[in-house]
Amino acid sequence: MNTPRLNTRQELSSGVATPGYTPQQHAPGIVHIGVGAFHKAHQAVYTDDALAAEGGDWRILGVSLRSDTAAEELNPQDGLFTVIERGNEPGSARIVGSIARVISASRDHKSVIAALVDPAIRIVSLTVTEKGYGIDRKTGGADTSHPAVAADLATPDAPGGVLGLIVAALATRRKNDVAPFTVLSCDNLPDNGAMLRGGVIDFATRKDPGLGDWISRNVAFPCSMVDRITPARTPATLAEATRLTGVEDQAAIETEPFRQWVIEDNFPTGRPAWEAGGAIFVQDVAPYEQMKLRMLNGTHSMLAYAGFLSGHRLVCDVMADTDMAALVRRHLLAAAATLDPLPGINIERYVADILSRFSNPNIAHETYQIAMDGTEKLPQRIFEPALVAQGQGQPLRPYAFATAAWMRYCSGRTDGGTPYALRDPKQQEITEILRNCAVPEKLADRLFNLKGLFPKKLLSDRNWTTQVTSILSVITGKGMREAVHQESLSA
Ligand code: CS2
């Protein structure tokens, strides 16, 4: 007999948590761009909790800019999906009902625009990854070399990228005298709201300075810090969902029990009661964001490059390697030392929590997944805390090691010679500059010169460049495993 597919009419196995409200009775109030596993494990769960606690018309209309997968998986299931939490206890399943529907921009562009200009939509939130925004981090304006930005500037009436869509929708709302929506970035970027605000205003001003000015005076862009480790889904996730719920769920995801969301409380047109799910509302998100980016994400990137090249497929395998675990701890402590104390946060506890989250053996989080998009991630995760450490006279070694591990990773071959794809927006440039370059000093030099990547203050510090180059020469000479071992002796 065929297993029935999850939808609002299907009976589920006992013990499965279902929405504490009737999803169809709540209209959408949020458009979310980027309906990937992370959104489903994070904002969708908080919204589910908010709807159960306080109701309101706050369901989510998902928008996928590039792929049809989310729409194909979720729409036949009335937007429902299973979240499997995997901690140290056996996994538990929960059905989330906060997503009403997903619109695929490539198939139904009209509906995307209609949703964004609908007065009922009061929040547009985003998880589009670091590279999805098309904002130049140096100037803070629109990055005209970004393909979606360039295309949208050329044909602003048919926007397909983040900046183009938001600006076109805000222009229409302004014309129709409809209050603007609040724009909420949920990606791992410092000052994500302020950054997006800068990009949107610059993009709008290029088109119409009056619009840029109106946006700067009327649209809120709160910052937020998001955290929940969510591995890419595998066929095992779907099989486990069926085992736990008794139905087939093509949209199931798995994640860790931990979750955190710190949000700047700036929602002029209202918001769901996300605090019901544990979200914390503050005036200034920056210190929380710095803590998370430098400690959790910075250490993640370091362990991804060194771990992947040491032959570890999963983060929990990295943590079971005592040499690597020593470097993980060293990196966390070094990053912690760059932060000011934060009321309500016990930093030793935060370190211990991260170590235990990374060691979770029931989460199949791949080092290769984290290694992706290094040029987009290293500036805020590694270089920024390195600059603080430099200014405060703290050791630069942990950041130099992370950087050298990334440089070695850029060569695109394991120590055994197996090639892998870099998966980085600068992949082509990196591959070209590294062609026929086996000498570590040259390799480091060429990557140091990658346009716009390294801060000048680091490049002009010989202590920094020499450490990176010498670590890289140990890695290339002796292999990653041995280099990690040597490094761990002084950790
Ligand atoms: C990871 C993050 O892939 C990565 O770069 O560092 O996705 C990390 O798992 C999340 O930020 C955790 O909240």
Image (cartoon, helix red, strand yellow):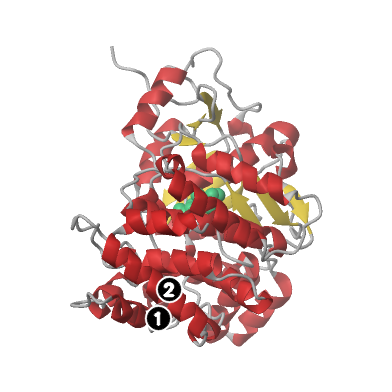
Closer to the camera in the image, 53 or 114 = 53
Looking at the image, residue 81 sits to the left or right of residue 293; the answer is: left
Mark 1, other Cα within 10 Å: few <14 / some 14–19 / many ≥20: some
For residue 200, the mark is none
Label number found at residue 448: 1
- The amino acid pointed to by label 2 is Val
Quarter-of-image position of residue 404: bottom left
Left or right, 48 with respect to 381, comes to: right
Task: Please state the horizontal and vertical placement of residue 24, each as a whole percent of the image.
Answer: 58, 32
Give the mark, 1 or 2, whose residue is nearer the N terminus. 1
Split into 4 quadrants, where in the image is the N terminus? Answer: top left
Q: Can I make out residue 111 in this image?
A: no
Q: Which residue is found at the position 30% from the left and 70% from the top? A: 427
Q: Is residue 458 above or below residue 342?
A: below
Q: Please tell me whether mark 2 sits on a helix, a strand or a loop.
A: helix
* Residue at x 20% of width, y 58% of height: 419
Q: Is mark 2 within 8 Å of ligand 1?
A: no
Along the line of sight, the residue nearer the viewer: 167 or 344? 344
Q: Residues within 10 Å of mark 2 (few under 14, many from 20)?
A: many
> Could you tell me how far apart the alpha carbons at marks 1 and 2 are, in whole angstroms?
10 Å
- The amino acid type of the residue labelled 1 equals Phe
* Residue hosting label 2: 468
Q: Position of residue 39 (x, y in %)?
A: 52, 47
